[in-house]
Structures are given as C-alpha cells and as structure tokens.
Image: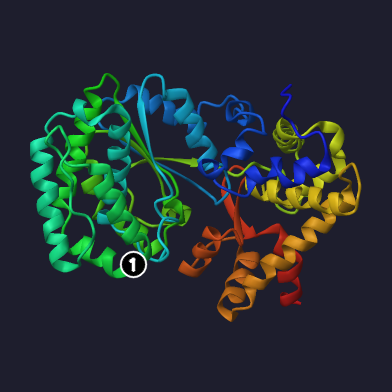
Amino acid sequence: MSSLKAKSVDEAAYKHLQVFTQPVNSWPEELKSQIPPFHELYLEPAKNPRDPVQRLLKQIQQVPGPVKLLLTGQKGAGKSWSLQHIREVLTPAYRVVWVTNPVAAFTDKAELEIADLLVLLCEALAGEWKKIGWKNLASLGTMNVELVGWIRRLNELRTLPVAPKEVETGGIEFDIAFMKISSEMRVDSEVRQAVRKAGTTALQIVANHLLKALAEQGRPVLVIFDDLDKMDLASAQTLFGPQFSVLESLPAKMVLTFPYALNFQNVLTQQREVIKNIQVFDKKGATELRKEAIERFTALLHKLVEPALVDDSAVQEAVRYSAGITREFGRIMAIAFEFASLSGDDRVLLSHSQEAVTDLRVELQRATQDAERRKGLREVAKTNELSSELERQLLNENMVVEYVNGKPWYDVHPLLEEVVAGWKS
C-alpha cells in the first residue's frame, strides 16, 4: 500500500483526483511528487489475449521493421495511461520518443497536416539528441543542407527568427531551429501555412537521419504520438489516409492515437487496437451494475485514496453514470470529493456523488442547445445506432457512448438520458 495515497477528503479532491482531469504527460511536477508513482497507479487489465495494450506490446517487440500501429477508444477510455504504461515497460529496451500534445499544441485545432506533425517530430528528436550531445550525431552534413534549404524556402514565404547557428560539430542546433519554428506555428496560422508550402521532403530527410542515427546509439527507436485522437475528423481522414505514407516511410516503430469516430469510415489500412469502455451493465435496460465493473473502478480509486474516505454506494453511483469510461468515473469522483470537502465532511457519501452527477449533467446539457445536436441525440436514443456524421461526432465528444455486450451498440451518455427522455416526451 502506497504511503502517498490521499489520507483526507481535501487531499483527494484537490490533489490526487486531479490525475483524471489532465493528460498523464501534463501532470505538474509538484503533483507527481505528492501522489503514488505511475507504475503503482496503472491498473493492469484482466488477463485477456485480446487486451489491446498487451497486443500492442507484443507487436512492437515481435513484428520486424518500422511497424506503425494505431490506438483508439472513446475520449477518456485510458489511451494516454496505456501509452505511458507501454513507455515504462519498453524504455529499458527502446529509446522512446514522445511527441507531446501535437493537437493541443496549436491554438487552431481545426487543422493538422503532415508538415505540422513532421516539425513536432523533428523537434522531439532534436531534443533527444541534445540529451545525448551533438558530438555523437553522425551525417550532420546532409541534414544541414536539407534543413538550411528548407528554412531558406520558409523565410521566402514568411520571415521567421530561425537562422540556424553553427555548433562545434559543424552542424546546426536542430533543437533550437525546430523549437522556434514550432512555437511560431502554435500561435500563428499564417506561419503554419508557410511551413506547409515550404514542403515536407526536407523534413522527411532530416527526420530520417535523426531516427537512423538514434537507432545506432544501441536501442531501437519507438515514437509515440498521443493526442491525435483529438483531431477533427476531416483532418484525420487526410492524415491517416493519403498523407500517412510519409510517416510509414520513416525508419522507426510508431504508435499513434486517432479519433474513435474514424473507425466508422473506410480510411484506415494500418493495424489498430481499440480500448473498449468497461462493461457496466449486462444488457440494455439493466439497472444492476456488473460486479466486475464495480470491483475494477473501486480498485482504481483505492490506488489513489484510502478506502475509508469513500462509501461504497458513492463509488457505485459514479460507476453507474460513467458509461464505463475511466475518465468519466474519475470526474464524478473528483467532484464528489470536492462537495464533501466544501461540506466539511471527512467521508464521501452517496449524496455527494449524486450532487456531482447533477453538476456534470448541467455542464453536459449546455452543449445540447443546438437543434441539430438535439435531433442527433434523440435519434441515437431511439435506434441505438450511428447513422450520420453528426452522430459519430457526438460519439467523439462523449455525448454518445458505445457499449459492447457481445456486439457494439450506442446510446446517449447516461448523464443525458433523463434530459433526452424529456425532449422525447
């Protein structure tokens, strides 16, 4: 039992349960020092040969060559935690390069193209080389020529403060160059357009050299792109369709997340794994929670907080309205602990979870004021199917959820069930 578990309602509400509200790679250092380490928090899935995390680990380790693997699941299902687990398991044998928040990095999230991704990849790779030391980097000459030519082309389109600086190896400071380019791209859509017009060929060559040289340092390279599941569907169709060949040409194993709704379109040809929502009920219309779901979510919560701080009925209420999605369960419990704290209670009761459910229902209901969304939600509640692009987008936004009981079926988020039933009546 970890000595860093929350021992009070206040601790749980304002520290430990914050891990559910932000990506694992964005946890503040101060928070990390006050909660159990990630390897203690990660809840191993039940033994199942079809478990997507175990399948990914096996494929990375066993499939030869620079295989590209895709991971998806509903928002909050546990993709980032799964990738962090993969990172920790494989780091001794692989040099793991994590491309941080490629979608959240940009103020304009409506678009993401392959040139944007290559800049962020090169920035991450250059940062890795900075740790090793530029003196150990071979083939600088070709990279210098390509990158300098690309920057010159970029400066013809849009002046940027990215003049490469010579270092003692005779090469340029790639980390500084890419950091400056990506920082401008994050806030200025005109810069992003200029980067795209400057082309991707030189960026491919630089990324190729950086990856090959890293692999020569003794460990194969594994690149992880998290956060790509937050892309809009139009951009994802292009990136994982015609543009994906650029990533496939790079000499490294990669794992990339992608929007769950893309599963419903004939775009993807790559190997992919799906993290399913936990089965909360045995069948549609059932009111009794599955014992296995209660046990799993309870075990996860007890990794963060002392069991004495929360009543079983409070946990079960959170499970009931979670739709089997880990982050949804965590959000309900985090707010329930906050209500308990504000009430001066030293234990979370059923009434606190009920208040949290009401609070989150109101928050979710605000997003249903559009007539088309209401129509889509009513249709899903009626048919339990996804028959339009809008309904698949609602799935991406967790206003619609997927249940898998032998076969997949769909319904509105349990927090919205009463609301949509009211519209129907």
* x then y, percent, for residue 196: 22, 61
Residue furthest to the bottom: 371
Q: Where 320 falls versus 43 (above or below)?
A: below
Quarter containing the N terminus: top right
Q: Check disc 1: other Cα within 10 Å, few if <14, some if 14-19, many if 20+.
A: some
Q: Is residue 325 visible?
A: no
* x then y, percent, for residue 83: 47, 36
Task: Report the front residue among 260 and 337.
Answer: 337
Task: Report the front residue among 220 and 181.
Answer: 181
The residue at the point 23 percent across, 62 percent down is 160
Q: Quadrant of residue 122?
A: top left
The residue at the point 75 percent across, 54 percent down is 285
Q: Which residue is mark 1?
A: 188
* x then y, percent, for residue 275: 52, 41
Task: Report the front residue among 23 and 48.
Answer: 23
Count of marks overlaid on the render: 1
